[in-house]
Image (cartoon, rainbow, N blue to C red):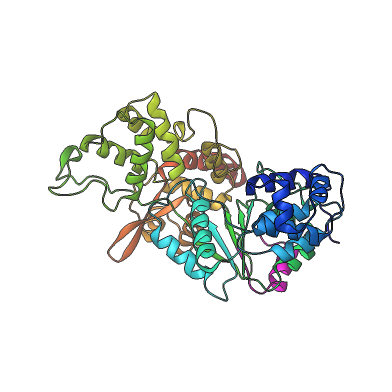
């Protein structure tokens, strides 16, 4: 069934559009061939059912964009949102959100994601990673490239629990909220299939479900939409991997962090001629946060080395580093480094208490606690054991040290890596890749593993 648009706001929409165009009622009448009296009646709310042709003449005279034209038509009592959206649908009506900051250090990940989005047969993709690693920002950049290069409409839906809920086509004057309202309902297993399918049809479209962390990622209505709209692609950002048929998962880890200072340069002294930030996106990003929060701190070698150690202690997680930088209002860089090493969760939520970002309003510390708590007992026990090892272990070494079968360790390490709790370290040793547990979750992992011991002992007895 096609939704009806809101009867309220036509007068306000038309008056605002005319003022935006910078013309009087008399000038609009002359440009549109619509009488001054008719325009006056519309702007005073005396006419609730204007002809669509009248609105089109007015919109053309004011040179309204497709989005403004659709908003004007949706404000008419009895206007069918589906009909309006079908005629106005395009790149201008459905743009991705504009990022507030530039993307740092994700060149390869962006290339991989945009390459998959450009592939005809890859239609369902999931960017999976720990809270705060930058999944939303990467998806924004990829969507912007697709939108700008190919003029592809992007229906961006914030799926977090605290996202403002669109009023839906029956109570909105915004064409964009009509699209997102249908898509959000569809992603949660509700209605909206007929409306979205009739609008998108055979048009290449990217649907982004940002923060889709609850329930199945591919509900039957969403799957049906993919079948009906053959040029539709769906991109999901999520903290939890889900095995869905046809889903291509792209794990997103934290930014690469600088290696510990080699012993031949005691005290963190750099090698002669070496740059302290070249090729170090985590350090570059952390320095930008520090510079904005404490512009009085001069970025000399000593500060840069301290910032590099802080970024390493916080595993290169952008949200953690941004929050930690806010603590420089109260702490010195050296104090911040000490806390980041010993109790990093104490600084991953900023001093304002405003969680923001990934997680729908929850603080990063709470999201990390939840990530470890969601693990099954097997991976949780392994993560606790691995958290006691220094970085740089291989899967075979871990299996030998824990008296476990290599196959079981590899399986569980793979699951931990998909969730972003274990990272692969650069380089290899003896031909074997090396890994490490994130510093942010070491203590959480040990506590979760310890909680499993009494239950295991009870079963054994």
Residue 312: x percent and y percent?
34, 43
Residue 381: x percent and y percent?
51, 48
Tell me if 264 is positioned left or right of 66 in this view. Answer: left
Tell me if 302 is positioned left or right of 19 in this view. Answer: left
Tell me the quarter of the picture where residue 96 sits. Answer: bottom right
Tell me the quarter of the picture where residue 372 sits. Answer: top right
Residue 58: x percent and y percent?
73, 56
In this view, the residue in front, 135 or 87, is: 87
Residue 184 seen from this side: no
Q: Quadrant of the N terminus?
A: bottom right
Picture residue at 49% right of the left edge, 62% below the top:
145
Asked if the magenta segment contains residue 216, the reply would be yes
Asked if the magenta segment contains residue 259, the reply would be no
Picture residue at 51% right of the left edge, 53% below the top:
135
Using the image, determine if residue 168 lies above or below residue 107.
above
Q: Quadrant of the C terminus?
A: top right
Tell me if 208 is positioned left or right of 384 in this view. Answer: right
In this view, the residue in front, 323 or 442, is: 323
Tell me if 447 is positioned left or right of 225 in this view. Answer: left
Residue 223: x percent and y percent?
71, 67
Picture residue at 71% right of the left edge, 45% below the top:
165
In this view, the residue in front, 43 or 192, is: 43
In this view, the residue in front, 17 or 137, is: 17
- The part of the chain drawn in magenta is 215-234
Using the image, determine if residue 176 lies above or below residue 123.
above
């Amino acid at each position: 069934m096609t939704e009806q648009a809101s009867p309220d706001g036509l007068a306000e929409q038309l008056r605002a559009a005319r003022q935006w165009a910078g013309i009087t009622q008399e000038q609009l009448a002359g440009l549109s061939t619509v009488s001054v009296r008719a325009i006056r009646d519309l702007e005073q709310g005396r006419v609730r059912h204007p002809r669509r042709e009248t609105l089109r003449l007015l919109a053309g005279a004011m040179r309204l964009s497709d989005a403004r034209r659709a908003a004007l038509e949706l404000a008419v009592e009895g206007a069918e949102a589906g009909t309006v959206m079908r005629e106005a649908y395009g790149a201008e009506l459905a743009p991705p959100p504009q990022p507030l900051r530039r993307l740092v250090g994700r060149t390869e990940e962006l290339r991989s994601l945009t390459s998959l989005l450009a592939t005809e047969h890859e239609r369902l993709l999931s960017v999976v990673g720990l809270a705060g690693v930058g999944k939303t920002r990467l998806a924004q950049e990829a969507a912007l490239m697709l939108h700008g290069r190919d003029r592809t409409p992007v229906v961006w839906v914030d799926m977090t629990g605290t996202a403002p809920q669109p009023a839906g086509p029956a109570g909105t004057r915004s064409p964009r909220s009509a699209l997102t309202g249908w898509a959000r309902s569809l992603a949660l297993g509700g209605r909206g299939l007929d409306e979205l399918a009739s609008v998108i049809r055979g048009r290449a479209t990217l649907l982004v479900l940002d923060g889709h962390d609850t329930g199945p990622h591919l509900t039957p209505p969403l799957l049906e939409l993919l079948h009906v709209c053959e040029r539709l692609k769906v991109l999901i950002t999520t903290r939890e991997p889900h095995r869905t048929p046809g889903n291509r998962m792209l794990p997103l880890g934290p930014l690469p962090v600088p290696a510990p200072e080699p012993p031949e340069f005691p005290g963190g002294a750099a090698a002669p001629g070496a740059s302290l930030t070249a090729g170090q996106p985590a350090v570059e990003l952390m320095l930008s946060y520090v510079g904005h929060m404490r512009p009085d701190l001069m970025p000399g070698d000593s500060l840069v080395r301290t910032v590099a150690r802080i970024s390493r202690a916080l595993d290169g997680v952008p949200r953690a580093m941004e929050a930690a930088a806010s603590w420089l209002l109260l702490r010195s860089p050296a104090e911040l480094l000490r806390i980041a090493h010993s109790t990093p969760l104490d600084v991953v939520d900023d001093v304002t208490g405003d969680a923001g970002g990934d997680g729908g309003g929850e603080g990063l510390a709470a999201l990390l606690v939840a990530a470890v708590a969601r693990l099954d007992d097997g991976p949780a026990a392994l993560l606790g054991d691995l958290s006691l090892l220094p970085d740089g272990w291989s899967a075979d070494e871990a299996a030998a040290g824990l008296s476990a079968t290599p196959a079981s360790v590899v399986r569980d390490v793979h699951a931990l890596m998909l969730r972003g709790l274990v990272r692969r370290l650069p380089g290899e040793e003896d031909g074997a890749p090396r890994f490490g547990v994130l510093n942010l979750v070491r203590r959480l992992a040990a506590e979760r593993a310890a909680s499993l011991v009494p239950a295991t002992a009870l079963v054994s007895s």
